[in-house]
Amino acid sequence: MSKRGFWGGFASLLIGLGVTFKRIFRRKVTIKYPHEPVPVSPIYRGPVRLIADEVGADHKCIGCLACQRICPTHAIPVLTVAKNEQNKNYPVDFVIDDALCCFCGLCVDVCPTEALEHARIGDLAATSQSLLRREILHEGSITSDNFPTRKGKKGGK
């Protein structure tokens, strides 16, 4: 073995050990998921949901279809609009396909009545793609309890 190969390998070993000793005393970042909840960043964009009106009985959506038109992945395929007694538009069906959604936030930004927002749910896994197609008009607020997620198997040690 040449001197250059030996000293080069030794220097590489010292660099690796230096990285190890720098990081060994840091706080651990391992999370025992799903037994411990995953912390969600304040700027995280989760699935889109409708915001309830101030009264709480209805939502703010006026059925302008701006969210459907601006969606780059066409994740809002069905937004049916009808007119009520006051001749104002309102949505009849409001479907969002989370399998197609890229969570870009354009639909939230373009909404003139600010009727849409991103839910702060960290676990978006589902057992089937059909579970990710949601009718958000009648589902109420999305929480981690009523969002269709994958359930872990019981057992283990």
Image: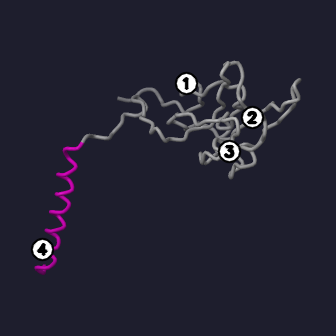
Q: Quadrant of residue 92?
A: top right
Dot in front, 3 or 4: 3
Structural distance between the alpha carbons of marks 3 and 2? 16 Å
Q: In this figure, which residue is indicated by the disc labeled 1?
A: 145
Foreground of the two, 125 or 108: 108
Name which of mark 4 and mark 1 comes first in the sequence.
Answer: 4
Neighbour tally class for label 3: few under 14, some 14-19, many 20 plus, Cα within 10 Å: some
Structural distance between the alpha carbons of marks 4 and 1? 58 Å
For image coordinates 60% across by 28% down, the residue present is 142
Q: In this figure, which residue is indicated by the disc labeled 2?
A: 94
Q: Is residue 83 above or below residue 110?
A: above
Callout 3–callout 4 Cβ contact below 8 Å: no
Dot in front, 3 or 2: 3
Give the x, y percent position of residue 40. Answer: 45, 36
Q: Is residue 101 above or below residue 147?
A: below
Callout 1–callout 2 Cβ contact below 8 Å: no
Neighbour tally class for label 1: few under 14, some 14-19, many 20 plus, Cα within 10 Å: few
Q: Which mark is residue 110?
A: 3
Name which of mark 1 and mark 3 comes first in the sequence.
Answer: 3
Structural distance between the alpha carbons of marks 4 and 2? 67 Å
Provide the secondary structure element on which disc 3 rests: helix
- Name which residue type carries label 2: Phe
